[in-house]
Image (cartoon, rainbow, N blue to C red):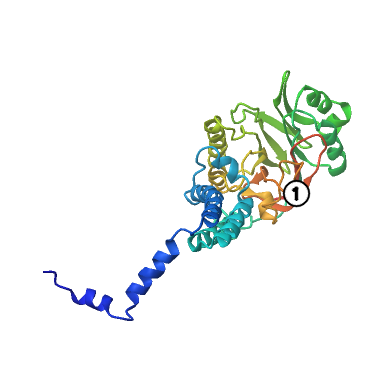
């Protein structure tokens, strides 16, 4: 004979809240009834599952496996499938799906905020301004935007230039007398037959070349003398996160991070096509060394730079100028160059 406990007896009493809560929970979790509603619920679950997988990796501070790194580059746009899931869940009269979609949209909005490695406002560099420096970084897409780059150099007159995907015609153009007069100091790497490999550093200030960060694509480095200060300039161009190439992408971003983490007290600047956004753990790890993203520092953290054919309406910011404590960003602009899938980035800095 079963003995009823006091708790069970109270739960069985009319009006007790426990049975009502259980019934509500079951109704909340119950799948929709009817073929059309079940189909709508399934259609809602598919995009919500993809969004949840990407957000889970973002929350876990990992880039995951293909296609997660590729989708992370466009994280703010996950709001579209999240809201699509919400519409379908409402149509299916699926309460669990509605809550799922609302949570996914809220988390996407939270992660879409600018990433701040320090967790608060960055400390302003101390000391007087000894020089104002203009930096331009541009990926020429296999040298196709060489003419556009030359035009930008004439118009914007940057002091330091980081060039990626500089092919042999790019190297020849940068060796022209007019360019040499404007930028007498340079380090140019242009490999015949490998248009993606080449890179260059152009400078109006005296420059001493140093061994750069190793990678499949050239990433030269130099020390530039500005107002009696030694400024370390490193070109960034790690491999993109292609399927089957994620280990290479992570390793090369890791080398850039190691360089940033091991920098000395002298000012350091890393500029180029990082093939990564603030939503990639490998890039955030680089920022966690204390390097500051110039575009983010002036409120342009979500301005797309790639692909240029859909930017600025749609795209990802993978071109960056990172600076150490002695360099303070004042302004940042993205420039549209013809015949390249990247937008160039122009940054004005104060050297203290």
How many callouts does the rendering have?
A: 1
Please give left or right for residue 176 compared with residue 236 in the image: right
Considering only vertical position in the picture, is 7 above or below 150? below
Give the x, y percent position of residue 270.
65, 40
Look at the image and tell me in which quarter the N terminus lies.
bottom left
Please give left or right for residue 58 compared with residue 124 in the image: left
Please give left or right for residue 336 compared with residue 24 in the image: right
Give the x, y percent position of residue 102.
55, 61
Considering only vertical position in the picture, is 162 above or below 134? above
Q: Residue at x 68, y 50 (%)?
A: 294
Q: Residue furthest front?
A: 34
Q: Is residue 114 visible?
A: no
Please give left or right for residue 226 compared with residue 153 in the image: left
Q: Residue at x 37, y 74 (%)?
A: 20
Q: Residue furthest top?
A: 192
Give the x, y percent position of residue 77.
64, 51
> Which type of secondary structure does the marked residue at label 1 adopt?
loop
Give the x, y percent position of residue 152.
84, 40
Q: Is residue 334 visible?
A: yes
In the foreground, 109 or 234: 109
In the foreground, 72 or 43: 43
Location of mark 1 (residue): 312
Q: Residue at x 65, y 34 (%)?
A: 237
Looking at the rendering, which quadrant does residue 250 occupy? Answer: top right
Looking at the rendering, which quadrant does residue 222 occupy? Answer: top right
């Amino acid at each position: 004979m079963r003995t009823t406990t006091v708790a069970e007896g109270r739960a069985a009493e009319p009006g007790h809240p426990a049975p009502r809560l259980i019934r509500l929970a079951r109704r909340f979790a119950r799948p929709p009834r009817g073929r059309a509603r079940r189909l709508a619920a399934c259609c809602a679950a598919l995009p919500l599952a993809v969004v949840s997988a990407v957000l889970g990796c973002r929350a876990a501070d990992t880039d995951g496996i293909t296609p997660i790194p590729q989708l992370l580059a466009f994280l703010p746009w996950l709001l579209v499938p999240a809201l699509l899931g919400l519409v379908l869940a409402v149509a299916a009269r699926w309460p669990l799906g509605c809550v799922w979609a609302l949570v996914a949209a809220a988390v996407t909005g939270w992660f879409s905020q600018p990433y701040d490695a320090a967790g608060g406002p960055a400390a302003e560099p101390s000391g007087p301004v000894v020089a104002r420096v203009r930096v331009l970084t541009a990926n020429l897409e296999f040298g196709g935007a060489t003419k556009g780059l030359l035009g930008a150099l004439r118009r914007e007159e940057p002091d330091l230039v980081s060039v990626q995907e500089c092919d042999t015609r790019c190297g020849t153009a940068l060796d022209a007398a007019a360019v040499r007069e404007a930028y007498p100091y340079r380090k140019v790497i242009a490999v015949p037959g490998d248009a993606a490999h080449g890179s260059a550093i152009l400078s109006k200030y005296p420059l001493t070349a140093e061994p750069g960060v190793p990678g499949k694509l050239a990433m030269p480095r130099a020390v530039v003398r500005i107002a009696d200060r030694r400024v370390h300039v490193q070109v960034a161009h790690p491999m993109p996160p292609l399927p089957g190439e994620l280990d290479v992408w992570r390793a090369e971003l890791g080398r850039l991070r190691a360089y940033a983490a091991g920098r000395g007290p002298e000012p350091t600047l890393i500029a180029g096509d990082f093939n990564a956004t603030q939503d990639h753990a490998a890039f955030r790890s680089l920022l966690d060394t204390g390097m500051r993203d110039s575009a983010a520092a002036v409120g342009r953290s979500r301005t797309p730079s790639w692909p240029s054919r859909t930017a600025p309406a749609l795209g990802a910011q993978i071109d960056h100028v990172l600076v150490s404590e002695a360099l303070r960003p004042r302004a940042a602009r993205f420039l549209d160059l013809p015949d390249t899938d990247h937008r160039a980035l122009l940054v004005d800095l104060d050297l203290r």
